[in-house]
Amino acid sequence: MKRLLLLCACLYFAHSGQAQVLPCLYDLGVDQLERQYPGYRDHSHRTVKEAVQAYHQRRDPDGSLFTIPVVIHVVWKEAEENISDARIEAQIRVLNEAFRRQNADTVNTRSDFQAVVGDAGIEFVLADIIRVQTDTLFAPEASLFGGVTLPDHVKQTANGGSDATDPVNHLNIWVCALQPISIFGTESPVLGFAYPPAGLDNWPAETPIPEEEFEGVVVDYRTVGDNEVYSIPAVGDLPMLGRTTVHEVGHYLGLRHTSGDGALAALGVPDCDVDDGVADTPNQGLQSQFNCDFSQNTCTDDVADLPDMVENYMDYSREDCQNSFTKGQIEIMRAVLTGPRAELPAEVTSSAEAQSATHGRLYPNPSSGVFYLELAEQQQSGSWQLFDGFGRLIMQSRYTAPTIRLDLQGHPAGLYFLQVKDAAGRQASWTLVRS
């Protein structure tokens, strides 16, 4: 199924001698694509709304766990752009921690928001790393009246990039050196961009539409990993903890910025009449300026005047402040994974709680090293396999006892996936958190 593309390029720019943040080029991009593909705006906005409505009707009662295969394309020119496997593995770990709410800094979520944040039940497995050396530059272009042209040629082998791998069934993430964009004569580094879903099945057959192979996420190589620093002119050294990719994957799964991308906000004026479509994120008129200002409150609400949620992954706060998705945002992403991106998950499994009741009990979880799986009586013989967060098989064995002992003391902290198949062929899986 072809899907409409909705762009989001997240960037900084300096203006009048002060560091400013230009919000995501959502409106400029929508305007440009509306001219190119008439009807774009209505269809792109309608798709996520319809997905959520359908999700309410078929809500998964067992809290299914979605597992998404990821293909990383490293498209590099200079040696430093050819990032290591270790940085890629760290990035996958950050994605898993963020979308399962297992990152250590969740304790920093303020009490105002503790009740509305949650575990998205979405995990990521590294399916492949593709490396392409190139002489091509990947630069977005913007004009005051002509909108923005993004460097989608990074997704095309024929144009110096790397072709997408089965974009219907894989999340493709391209890592490259994104060139700065010129805004009002000032160069601004670009961190990344993504294409959230929009359904096209009801478009007239003669209407031209973007191709599936352009779907996915593009991020600058300096943002990848969990311990990098990006030096931004007029802004300073920003910690990069892998949350640029978390932010962009949020867009890919249907989320907008917490500010709602109001037109006035692009000019630095709080726009409190525009919303992100999520009920449990507070009204926010401006994106954060890549700071950790917990006193920031750009909009005053009549009922509950909450501060801006700078700990939200979809804000522009510093990455060492971001730690949460809200339950409303989670509902949107899960609706997308049962709607317009229903073919993306490689596996949809029951929650750990449902499995425990039927197949066995895993404890302690999280654990600093040793786990025990106490199996239900009818499943006390068979075989098991343990995979790390990147889908690599690290242990396997047969069992004939009611309890399986798993010792991960010699393995790094992170997520692991246990699959058990009993003698009758029944299968179950659990997610282990090695702390």
Image (tube, helix red, strand yellow):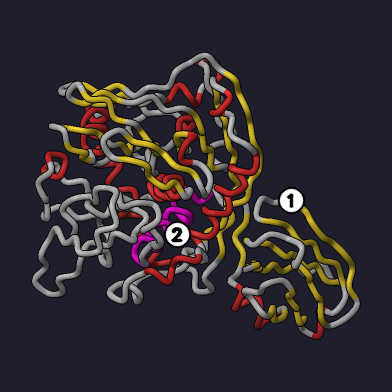
Residue 120 visible in the snapshot: yes
Q: In front of the other: label 1 or label 2?
A: 1
The question of residue 341 being in magenta is answered with: yes
User: Which label belongs to residue 219?
Assistant: none
Relative image position of residue 331 (x, y in whole percent): 39, 63
Crowdedness of circle 2 by 10 Å Cα count: few (<14), some, many (20+)?
Answer: many
Query: Mark 2 = which residue?
Result: 334
Identify the element where label 1 is drawn.
loop
Relative image position of residue 64 (x, y in whole percent): 55, 66
Q: CA distance from mark 1 to mark 2?
A: 26 Å
Provide the residue span drawn in magenta: 327-343
Query: Mark 1 = which residue?
Result: 392
Is 241 situated left or right of 48 in this image?
Answer: right
Task: Please state, as top left, top right, bottom left or bottom right, where the C terminus lies in the image.
Answer: bottom right
The residue at the point 12 percent across, 74 percent down is 303
- Say which amino acid is labelled 2: Arg
Is 268 situated left or right of 237 in this image?
Answer: left
Identify the element where label 2 is drawn.
helix
Relative image position of residue 239 (x, y in whole percent): 42, 47
The residue at the point 39 percent across, 67 percent down is 57
- Say which amino acid is labelled 1: Arg
The residue at the point 54 percent across, 73 percent down is 62
Quick one: label 1 or label 2, which is nearer the N terminus? 2
